């Protein structure tokens, strides 16, 4: 599992890229990706292009990010999901909480 981040040029958007398994072993790295920034971004992109697996703890981490980013007003999109990851997100009704593509 690898988690990397990129901020937009104006610093308003943070992209978090997840590669490999997104499970409990990612918990600390995922939280550090968005909590230790000097300025809180206005929006977040979770890039799942290289994610191969997603478990229930990963779903919980996404919900923690949503709470951190403002709950119902959070602007988070989950992008580039493979079919397996998208199926898990859909079964969990995450499309009601996040913009998923």
Image (spheres, grey):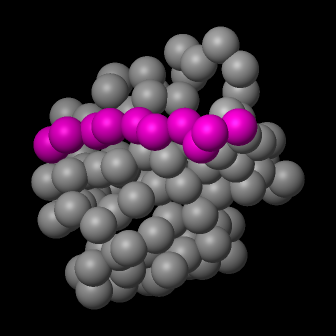
Relative side of 55 to 66, left or right = left
Residue at (62% x, 39% y) in the render:
9
Q: Is residue 66 visible?
A: no
- Taking the view exactly as shown, the residue that stands out farthest to the right is 73
- Counting from the top left corner in percent of width and height, residue 101 is at 50, 80
Dominant secondary structure of the residues highlighted in magenta in the image = strand
Residue in front for this viewpoint, 47 or 85:
47
- Counting from the top left corner in percent of width and height, residue 21 is at 16, 53
Residue at (29% x, 50% y) in the render:
18
Q: Is residue 75 above or below residue 65?
A: below
Q: Is residue 70 visible?
A: yes
Q: Is residue 79 magenta?
A: no
Relative side of 97 to 27, left or right = right
The magenta stretch is 1-10
Residue at (23% x, 61% y) in the render:
51
- Counting from the top left corner in percent of width and height, residue 17 is at 35, 49
Residue at (41% x, 37% y) in the render:
5
- Classify the position of the N terminus by image quarter: top left
Please tell me how many numbered marks the rendered image carries: 0
**On the image, which quarter does residue 52 sit in?**
bottom left
- Counting from the top left corner in percent of width and height, residue 3 is at 29, 39
Q: Is residue 93 above or below residue 70?
A: below
**On the image, which quarter does residue 80 sit in?**
bottom left
Q: Is residue 12 above or below residue 83?
A: above
Q: Is residue 3 magenta?
A: yes
């Amino acid at each position: 599992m690898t988690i990397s981040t990129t901020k937009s040029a104006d610093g308003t958007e943070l992209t978090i890229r997840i590669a490999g398994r997104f499970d409990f072993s990612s918990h600390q790295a995922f939280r550090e990706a968005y909590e230790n920034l000097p300025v809180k971004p206005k929006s977040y992109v979770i890039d799942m292009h290289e994610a191969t697996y997603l478990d229930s703890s990963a779903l919980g981490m996404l919900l923690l990010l949503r709470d951190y980013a403002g709950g119902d007003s959070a602007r988070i999109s989950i992008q580039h999901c493979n079919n397996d990851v998208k199926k898990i997100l859909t079964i969990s009704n995450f499309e009601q909480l996040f913009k998923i593509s």
